[in-house]
Image (cartoon, rainbow, N blue to C red):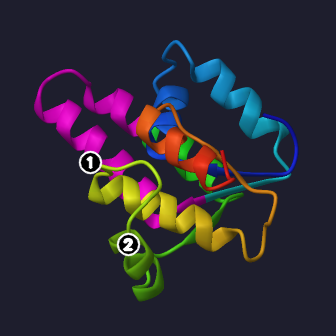
Amino acid sequence: MTAGAIYLETSSLLAWLFSESRGADVRASLDAAKYVATSSLTLAEAERAFVRLEAEGALRSGDAQRYRGALARARTQWLRLAISDEILARASAPFPVEPVRTLDAIHLATALSFTKALPDIRVLSLDRRIMQNAEALGIG
């Protein structure tokens, strides 16, 4: 994915932050994008991942703080949308490839909302269901 605008979904964000196997690809896409857009949901899901992993003992507190710092620095450059009534209404409607989980529907609806200002936006997700729908919606 190069240039233009990217909608950053949580699976991609966490792959980058945690240096997972596709994390370098995500970072390259973020670096190449003119705009990075995301939902307030993405940030909440990332924080919940940190909390959950700490509670399970899979993430040390110091490492969690390092990830939070990296996220805080990166997100200052990102465009963000809150979950509005309009987004919830679109998330409640059918998508091309059902079934779609509620949080995934909110991500898709948010990405669609960004197309008003960023018509070339493309979804960056490692979730197969999200990408199937993004492609069917013309934002994949």
Q: Which amino acid does the dot numbered 1 rest on?
A: Arg
Describe the element under mark 2 as helix, strand or loop.
Answer: loop
Q: Earlier in the sequence, mark 2 or mark 1?
A: 1
Locate the C terminus by quadrant: top right
Q: Position of residue 51 (x, y in %)?
A: 22, 42
Identity of the residue drawn at 27% across and 32% down: 61
Foreground tag (2 vs 1) = 2
Residue 72 at x, y percent in the picture: 54, 52
Query: Does 9 appear above or below 102?
Result: above
Q: Which mark is residue 93?
A: 2
Q: Can you name the residue that lies furthest to the bottom here?
A: 85
Examine the structure image and report whether residue 63 is included in the region drawn in magenta.
yes
Q: Amino acid at mark 2?
A: Ala
Identify the residue at horizontal 52%, vertical 40% (top origin): 132
Side of 14 relative to 25 (left or right): left
**Foreground residue, 81 or 56?**
81
Q: Residue 116: percent from the left, percent from the top? A: 73, 77
Q: Is residue 48 above or below residue 52?
A: below
Q: Is residue 13 left or right of residue 44?
A: right
Q: Are marks 2 and 1 in contact (CB under 8 Å)?
A: no
| Residue in front for this viewpoint, 76 or 109 | 109
Q: Which residues are magenta?
A: 38-65
Q: Is residue 40 visible?
A: yes
Residue 121 numbered tag = none
Label 1 sits on residue: 48
Q: Residue 35 is drawn in which quadrant?
A: bottom right
Q: Nearer the viewer, residue 120 or 61?
A: 120
Q: Is residue 66 left or right of residue 99?
A: right
Above or below for 86 versus 115: below
Marks 2 and 1, Cα distance to the nearest angstrom? 26 Å
